[in-house]
């Protein structure tokens, strides 16, 4: 039994949710998101709430019940208030520049590392921090993870790219005799 699926989703004022067969579209003050929900879970819009019911008692239906509810919660939240991720770049000579729709990183390699920014993600570059914002939680999380993977923080000096909430556990290193 899914606690999230049983709870359902309440639709705030100013947000409209429409369903066309298996396609669910959420429109809000910040934009519009659509997703196809084909599978063993029925989604019904009843007044100002969205109700989820599994079509049968199979393992897939139980697994996707909460997943579908979670996706719709994120869609409704995203069109009302954008999601944000902050990354911090630490290290001597480590920096980032924004050139149009591309981020160019200097991360201690012999070459610069360019990354194309997805269309639905907005980027704010300040000194050594990157702030991503988007109404789509999946795309912002995926892009932030790809940026962090270019140079993960190392445990000895803490150099690399890390989330602002991430704590890097430091190691002591070699002791001199």
Image (cartoon, grey):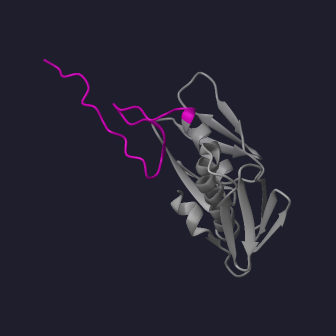
Residue 156 in magenta stretch: yes
Q: Residue at x 63, y 44 (%)?
A: 60
Magenta-drawn stretch, dominant element (helix, strand or loop): loop
Residue 90 in the image, given as x and y percentages of width and height? 46, 41
Q: Residue at x 54, y 53 (%)?
A: 86
Above or below residue 133? Residue 96 is above
Q: Is residue 73 left or right of residue 37?
A: left
Question: Toward which corner of the image does residue 71 lie, by quadrant?
Answer: bottom right
Above or below residue 126? Residue 4 is below
Residue at the right extreme of this rendering: 20
Residue 100 in the image, given as x and y percentages of width and height? 77, 47
Is residue 29 in view from this perspective? no
Residues drawn in magenta: 149-177
Of the 4 image quadrants, the one containing the C terminus is top left
Q: Residue at x 36, y 32 (%)?
A: 155
Residue 62 in the image, given as x and y percentages of width and height? 59, 50
Question: Toward which corner of the image does residue 169 lie, by quadrant?
Answer: top left
- Near-viewer residue (24 or 89): 24
- Near-viewer residue (94 or 173): 173
Residue at the left extreme of this rendering: 177
């Amino acid at each position: 039994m899914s606690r999230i699926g049983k709870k359902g989703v309440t639709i705030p004022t100013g947000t409209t949710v429409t369903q066309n067969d298996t396609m669910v579209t959420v429109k809000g003050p910040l934009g519009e998101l659509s997703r196809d929900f084909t599978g063993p879970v029925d989604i019904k819009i009843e007044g100002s709430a969205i109700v989820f019911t599994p079509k049968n008692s199979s393992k897939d239906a139980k697994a996707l019940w909460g997943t579908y509810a979670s996706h719709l919660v994120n869609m409704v939240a995203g069109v009302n208030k954008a999601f944000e991720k902050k990354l911090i770049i630490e290290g001597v000579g480590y920096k980032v520049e924004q050139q149009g729709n591309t981020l160019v990183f200097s991360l201690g390699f012999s070459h610069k590392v360019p990354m194309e920014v997805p269309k639905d993600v907005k980027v704010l570059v300040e000194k050594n921090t990157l702030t991503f914002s988007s109404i789509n939680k999946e795309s912002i999380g995926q892009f932030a993870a790809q940026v962090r993977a270019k140079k993960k923080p190392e445990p000895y000096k803490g150099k690399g790219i890390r989330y602002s909430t991430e704590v890097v556990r430091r190691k002591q290193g070699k002791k001199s005799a």
